[in-house]
C-alpha cells in the first residue's frame, strides 16, 4: 500500500472512531441518571451564558466577567450564532470540539508519518484514541481540545523548521488558554542557540502575535480585562492539586477533616489551610520550568516535542489549580514520543488518566470533599505521585528515538521535502514497515 493511501485510510478510520466516541459520550452525558456525569455539561451552561449575553448586546470583559482569555470567547460565541436554545447549543458546541479533535488526528498523522513507519502511525493514533476514550466525558464536556490543538500544532511546525507559523500558532494558543505559550519557552531557547540561522523569527512572531492580541483584547474589554487576571490571581488551593493532596492525606492520618470552600466555580481548601501553599505555587512553577529548560539545554536541544510536554506537565504538577481536564493538553504530545521513554510515559500517563476519571466525574471527588474514608484521598495522591514520576521520566529518561537529521530541534532546517506538506501529511514518498522511527 502506497504512503498516501495508508495515511488517508488511517486518518479516516481514526476520525470515524472519534465521531462515534463523541456521539456515544454525548448520549451518555445527556441520558445518564448519575448526577456527577450529567453535571459535566455545566460548563456548556457557562459558555452558553457568556455567548448569550454578547448576543444581547453586552460586551465581554467590559460589561461582564469572562474568566478565559480573549481567543477563547469565539469558541463560545460561534455555536451560539447558529442556535438559540441551550439543548441545541450543547450539540453545536460538541460538534465544534469534534472539529478540533479531527485537526489533532491530522496533525498527529502529519508528525508521525515524517518520522516513522506504519506501525508508528497506527500506534500514535491508537494511544491518542485511548486517552480520549478514558477521559471522554471531559473531552466532550470542556473546550480543552481547542488550545491543545494549537499547542501541538505550534510545536509540530516550530520544531520542524517552520518557525514563523509555529510562533504565530503559539501566540494564538496563549491568547486562548495561556499554556500553549510554554511551547515557546522551549522553542525560543533553541532559536537563541542557533540565532545566526534562525534569526529568532519564531520568537519574534510569537511576541508580535501576543502583543497584537493583547491590544485587541483591551480594545474590546478596556480595564475590565484586568478583572480576568484578578479572578485567577485570587484563586486559592484547588482540592486536586499535589499540595492539597498532601494536606488531605495528613488530615486523614491526624483524624482531622480538612475544610474546603466552593469559590471560582471549583472546590478549594479553606484559606486557613491552603493560602500559604497557594502562594508557593508560582515560585515552584518557576523553579520547575527552569529545570525543564536546563535539561533541554543539556540534552542537546534535539527533542523539542518531549521537552514541550515536560514544560506543560511540570507547570501542572506545581500549579495551585489542577482541574481534571488539564490532562487533555498532553494527549497528542505523549502520543507521538519515541523510544523507551515514550513507551513508558504513555503507559504511566494512561494510568493517570484512568485515576483522574475515577476522581471526576467518578465518585472519588465527592468522597474526598465529604470525608467518606481515606481510599479516595489515597487515589488522589497516587495520581499526583505518578504525575511527578512522569515529569521525572520526561526530564531524565533515556533520549532514545530522538531526532537525528529529522529537523525536530527548534529552528532546525527541515530534512525532508515532504515536511513542507505538513498541513495534510499526505506526501507521496513510500512508507514501509521498516521505517519505525527508532534509532
Image (cartoon, rainbow, N blue to C red):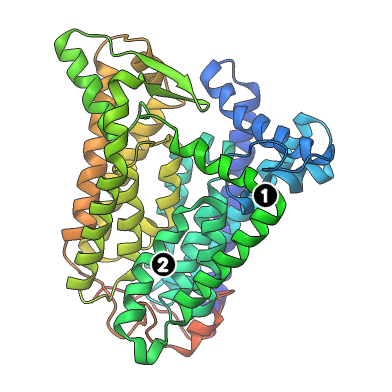
Q: Residue at x 20, y 21 (%)?
A: 249
Judged left or right of residue 426, residue 60 is right
Instruction: Assess whether mark 2 and mark 1 are in contact (beta carbons under 8 angstroms).
Output: no
Residue 415 seen in the current view: no
The mark found on residue 184 in the picture is 2
Q: Where is residue 111? Give x, y as percent.
A: 45, 71
Extreme residue in the front direction: 223
Using the image as rendered, state which of residue 280 and residue 223 is in the foreground. 223
Q: Residue at horizontal 63%, vertical 51%? A: 70
Q: Quadrant of residue 270?
A: top left
In this view of the protein, which residue sits in the foreground, 310 or 267? Answer: 267
Within 10 angstroms of label 1, few (less than 14), some, or many (20 or more) residues?
some
Q: Nearer the viewer, mark 1 or mark 2?
A: 1
Q: Nearer the viewer, residue 175 or 43?
A: 175
| Number of residue marks | 2
Residue 410 locus on image (x, y percent): 37, 77
User: Residue 113's image quarter?
Assistant: bottom left
SS at mark 2?
helix
- Residue 132 at x, y = what percent? 48, 45
User: Are there few (<14), some (14-19), or many (20+) residues within 10 Å of tag 2?
Assistant: many
Asked if residue 336 is positioned above or below residue 117 in the image, the reply reads above
Q: Is residue 106 left or right of residue 360?
A: right
What residue is drawn where x is 43% and y is 32%?
A: 235
Mark 1 secondary-structure assignment: helix
Q: Which residue is mark 1?
A: 222
Q: Position of residue 284 (x, y in %)?
A: 25, 46
> Does label 1 or label 2 sit earlier along the sequence?
2
Quarter of the rendering occupied by the C terminus: bottom left
Mark 1 to mark 2 CA distance (whole Å): 27 Å
* Residue that appears at 62% across and 49% down: 72
Identity of the residue furthest to the bottom in this view: 196
Image-based side of 340 in relation to 5, left or right: left
Amino acid at each position: 500500500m502506497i504512503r498516501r493511501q495508508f495515511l488517508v485510510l488511517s486518518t479516516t478510520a481514526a476520525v470515524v472512531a472519534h465521531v462515534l466516541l463523541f456521539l456515544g459520550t454525548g448520549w451518555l452525558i445527556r441520558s445518564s441518571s448519575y448526577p456527577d456525569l450529567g453535571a459535566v455539561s455545566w460548563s456548556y451552561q457557562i459558555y452558553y451564558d457568556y455567548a448569550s449575553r454578547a448576543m444581547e448586546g453586552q460586551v465581554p470583559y467590559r460589561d461582564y466577567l469572562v474568566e478565559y482569555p480573549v481567543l477563547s470567547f469565539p469558541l463560545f460565541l460561534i455555536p451560539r450564532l447558529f442556535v438559540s436554545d441551550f439543548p441545541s447549543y450543547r450539540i453545536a458546541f460538541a460538534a465544534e470540539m469534534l472539529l478540533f479533535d479531527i485537526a489533532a488526528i491530522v496533525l498527529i498523522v502529519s508528525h508521525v508519518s515524517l518520522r516513522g513507519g506504519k506501525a508508528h502511525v497506527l500506534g500514535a493514533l491508537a494511544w491518542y484514541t485511548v486517552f480520549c476514550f478514558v477521559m471522554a466525558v471531559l473531552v466532550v464536556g470542556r473546550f480543552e481540545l481547542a488550545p491543545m490543538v494549537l499547542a501541538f500544532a505550534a510545536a509540530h511546525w516550530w520544531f520542524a523548521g517552520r518557525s514563523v507559523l509555529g510562533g504565530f500558532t503559539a501566540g494564538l494558543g496563549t491568547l486562548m488558554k495561556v499554556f500553549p505559550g510554554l511551547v515557546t519557552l522551549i522553542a525560543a531557547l533553541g532559536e537563541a542557540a542557533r540565532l545566526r540561522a534562525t534569526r529568532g523569527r519564531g520568537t519574534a512572531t510569537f511576541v508580535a502575535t501576543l502583543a497584537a492580541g493583547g491590544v485587541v483584547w483591551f480594545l474590546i474589554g478596556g480595564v475590565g480585562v484586568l478583572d480576568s487576571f484578578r479572578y485567577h490571581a485570587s484563586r486559592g488551593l484547588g482540592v486536586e492539586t499535589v499540595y492539597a493532596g498532601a494536606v488531605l492525606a495528613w488530615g486523614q492520618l491526624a483524624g482531622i477533616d480538612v475544610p474546603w470552600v466552593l469559590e471560582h466555580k471549583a472546590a478549594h481548601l479553606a484559606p486557613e489551610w491552603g493560602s500559604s501553599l497557594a502562594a508557593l505555587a508560582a515560585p515552584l512553577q518557576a523553579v520547575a520550568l527552569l529545570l525543564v529548560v536546563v535539561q533541554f539545554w543539556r540534552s542537546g536541544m534535539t527533542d523539542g516535542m518531549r521537552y514541550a510536554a515536560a514544560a506543560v506537565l511540570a507547570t501542572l504538577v506545581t500549579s495551585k489549580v489542577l482541574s481534571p481536564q488539564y490532562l487533555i493538553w498532553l494527549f497528542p504530545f505523549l502520543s507521538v514520543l519515541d523510544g523507551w521513554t515514550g513507551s513508558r510515559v504513555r503507559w504511566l500517563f494512561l494510568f493517570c488518566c484512568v485515576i483522574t476519571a475515577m476522581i471526576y466525574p467518578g465518585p472519588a471527588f465527592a468522597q474526598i470533599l465529604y470525608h467518606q474514608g481515606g481510599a479516595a484521598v489515597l487515589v488522589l495522591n497516587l495520581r499526583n505521585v505518578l504525575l511527578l514520576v512522569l515529569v521525572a521520566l520526561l526530564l531524565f529518561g533515556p533520549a532514545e528515538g530522538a531526532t537525528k537529521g529529522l529537523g525536530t530541534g527548534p529552528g532546525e532546517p527541515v530534512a525532508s521535502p515532504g515536511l513542507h506538506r505538513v498541513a495534510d501529511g499526505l506526501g507521496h514518498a513510500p512508507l514501509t514497515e521498516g521505517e519505525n522511527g527508532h534509532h
